Structures are given as structure tokens and as C-alpha cells.
Image (tube, helix red, strand yellow):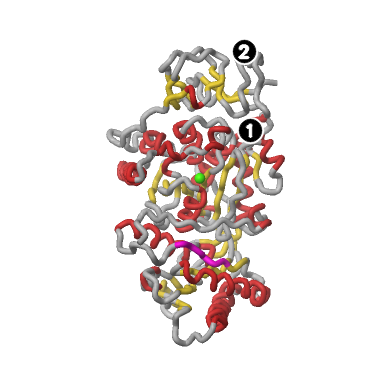
Amino acid sequence: MPLTIRMNSRDNVAIVANNGGLPAGTVLSTGQILTELVPQGHKVALTELKKDDAVLRYGVPIGYATQDIAAGSWVHERLLRMPQARTLDELPLATIRPDAAAPLEGFTFEGYRNPDGSVGTRNILAITQTVQCVAGVTAFAVQRIKTELLQQFPNVDDVVALEHSYGCGVAIDAPDAVVPIRTLRNISLNPNFGGEVMVVSLGCEKLQPERLLPPGAIPVIDQRHNKLGDAALDVVCLQDDAHVGFMSMVDAILRQARAHLQRLNARRRETVSASELVVGVQCGGSDAFSGVTANPAVGFCTDLLVRAGASVMFSETTEVRDGIALLTARASTPEVAQAMIREMAWFDAYLQRGGVDRSANTTPGNKKGGLSNIVEKAMGSIVKSGSAAITGVLAPGEKLKHKGLTFAATPASDFICGTLQVAAGMNLHVFTTGRGTPYGLAEVPVIKVAARSDLARRWHDLMDVNAGTIADGSATIEEVGWELFRLMLDVASGRRKTWAEHWKLHNALVLFNPAPVT
Ligand code: CA
């Protein structure tokens, strides 16, 4: 049966859902006859289009026809001229006030409560590093901690070295250096690390431990006064005169790690409200199905999370830039809308400095998967944000301050976006993909949602949820959204592991450093 999907009643194109595409001569249920083969995920013209006519998908122009296009033809990227990006002037500010949906009550998970009130979904010892120079020594020590120490502390899930490329050889006083520095600081304070911060430093690096984690950065419970106090910074410095030989450094890291492992091991999961979830959503390896199946299911789940009082972040600035008017209209206040515009303007200038614009986002795989340009990709990407009012905005590397739906400005790069969402305090990550990626993080569980059933079948031991059932007609967006919501509570509780956790697929932390290196 020929299967096509149209997203909006205004659309003059639909995408072909059938595996392998549809051959010339196929009669669609809407009456058109295909003039040529249209691959799966690609667009077919539902009406005759004249040169310069707007091609509408999601009810908006994703491009303009560069020539006349007959009904039933394949509308590929070479037949489309991309629209200009909307200017950031005169945008609607908080004009739509989405009705606050009924609160979703009674959902809980088993999490680790932290001294600062946040809740972890995993109990991990993270070893912070001030500079890349110490990465090899720290990795050596972590290997020994895993083989010699970890089995003595069965309640601790893992030991993770927070390796990164920053810390020296950088213009550390440049205004934009604030981004990588606060990112590293806030990663160390992620809820999954239980407030047990330990640092390995070289000694001579630009990013000194006190600059990375100044007094007051690490909250602990002051038992005597029963209030939040200030933990002393625990640093192993490799250039310290006391170290004679490599093993002295390694032993020092093991000794310090033992003290943190003891405290982490004493922690127990407790029942907490689903409102303690801090979920980062993103997509990668996208195709035309991402915006039809997986992202709408995530969007439905985002609405459930917001109704449950949880925190949800959507990101990927270049993938929301073309939907900015929809988002500023959905902001809860004009101030939130202005903050979103400020982040877009900053990123526009950043791209311009590099001689490109948002169109640099799309990949060969996106185009092969039917996404003609960034406008079409963006319309499918912002669906992940659901329909709730946007109540918060974060600049890159900042820590989340609000419950509800937040726009956390990040590049769309999977690893950089994930890294910045870890810094924002995410305790659960949801990742959608159409073409497939084995993405995973050591710091936070990653639930992967396949946009196509064919991908879910082939990658059956990498994908956690199959949203392709929506295109097949065997499940609804709502059903997959609820499946994802329930899976999140199981994964957050440690009752279920994601496939990326099962195989220990860990991508690197990749810092966003818009400042110069020296
Ligand atoms: Ca991405």
C-alpha cells in the first residue's frame, strides 16, 4: 500500500513512508500518479507547482520552487531555493498563552537526593580535570579504581574521568572563555555525581582549580548548622613536590577516590516525584521521519513531563532558528522571549564571524534522508519542544534554574549539545535519530528513539524505543509518547538500563569554546 504523510492541511508536499520508496506510476491514495521514483522519506508534489511557488511543509514555506514542478514529482533539494532567515526584529513576544494543561500527579521514580536538593538517576564518582595534560594519568588511575576499588562499593554505579581538551593554551581571559569554564564547573556539579567533587590538576595550567571551582561552588550540608555550607576543594596536583614518580600520583588519586566512594556508597535511592526529572532532548542523524514520528512523540512526552512538574530542555540553536517566531510567541513572558532572541542574535554573529550561516547545519545524511535544507530540518526538530509555554532560557554552559520547559542555547552538534545539557544539570537524556547513531554518555543515561521501524529492526540492540510504528500506522504519537514517559521513569530509577549503558557506549565530552586558543 502506498503510504504518504502530510503534516499540515496547508502542505502541498507529502513524504513517502514506504520502505525503499515508491516507483514511477504508483497511484497515491490522494490521487496523484508518481512521475518518477520517490525514495523513502522524500517529498512528492501533491499539486502542480509553478516556478517561485512556496513549497509548504508543516504549514510553512520550506523553500521556493526553482522551476515548474508537476504533481507527482519528486521535490528534492535541487528544486528548492531556501528562504532567508527571518530577522530578529518585530517578533511576536509571548503572544500565545498556551493553556496550562492539567497537572499530571502520582508519578514517581527512585532517585538519589543530593545536598543541594537536586536528584541523581545514577550514583557516579566523577573525577574533574582542570586541563587535558592530566588525562592520561587520570585514565590510568580510573582503570585501577575500577579493577581494585569499585567492587568494595557496590552502590556506586561507575567511575568516570571528565576528560576534555580545555585548560591551557587558551585565551582564558577572553570574554567568551566564560562558556567553557562554566561548562566544566557545572558538569562537575551534575546531580548524578552526588556533590562528591574531586579534581586532578597539573599545577602550571591557566585554568587553576580555584578558578574552575571558586569558594562556594560546591554545596554540602553543614551538619552542625543544618544548612548548606561550603566544601573544601579536594585537589590532587601532579606537579606537587611530594610526588616522586608516577605511582605516587596514581596512589594519591586512588586514596582521594576512596574517601568519595565511601560517601557515595552510603547513599540509597528514595522515592521522589517525577518532577525531579531534568530531561535534555536532542536529535541527531535526522531524516524526514525524525520530524514525523520520533520528534512528535518526544514532544508529546515533553508535555507530559511539564505537566508532571519536571524540567525539560530543548536546544540546538541552528535547528530552532527558522522557527524562532513560533517559539518567541510561546514564551511565558516578553522577558523570556527577549532572552531567546538574545541567544539567537549571539549565535547568528558567531556563525557570521566564521563566514557561514545556519544553512551550514545540514549533513549529507540529512539530505539523503529527505531533509532538503535547514528550514525543513528545523520545523521537524522544534517539535521535540511540545506545546507548553517556554518559561526559561539558558546561555551555553549555564546551570538550569527553572522547572518547566527551557530553551538551553547550544550548538546542534550531538556531542557539544549533550555536554552542555550535562552542564545544565540533566539527569536523563532523550535522543532521536532517523538514520541511526550509537550515541551515548558515561555521565547520564541516554534513551535513544528510532524514527523508522527499519532502523529499529536493524539496530535492535542500540535503539530503546521504536517511534517508526507511528509511520507504519501501528501506534499513535500519544502511545509512543506514553511508552517513552514510562521508560524514562524505569531508566531514572535504575530498574532498566539503556542499550548505550548496556554496551558502555560513551561519547567524549566536547566543550563549546567560542574564544580563541593561543
Ligand atoms: Ca544534535
The magenta stretch is: 160-165
To which quarter of the image does residue 74 belong? top right
Q: Which residue is mark 2?
A: 33
Residue 233 is marked as none
Q: Residue at x 53, y 37 (%)?
A: 364
Residue 4 spot, x, y in % from top left: 61, 23
User: Taking 155 as reference, is 183 left or right?
Assistant: left
Q: Residues within 10 Å of mark 1 (few under 14, many from 20)?
A: many
Residue 470 is marked as 1
- The local secondary structure at tag 2 comes to loop
The image quadrant where one finds the C terminus is bottom left
Q: Is residue 501 above or below residue 484?
A: below
The amino acid on which the numbered mark 2 sits, given as a three-letter code, is Ile
User: Taking 320 as reference, is 429 left or right?
Assistant: right
Label 2 vs 1, first from the N-terminus? 2
Which residue reaches farthest left?
89
Q: Is residue 257 above or below residue 372?
A: below
Residue 416 spot, x, y in % from top left: 47, 52
Q: Residues within 10 Å of mark 2 (few under 14, many from 20)?
A: some
- The local secondary structure at tag 1 comes to helix
User: Taking 146 as reference, is 385 left or right?
Assistant: left
Q: Residue at x 51, y 72 (%)?
A: 196
Q: Residue at x 31, y 36 (%)?
A: 88
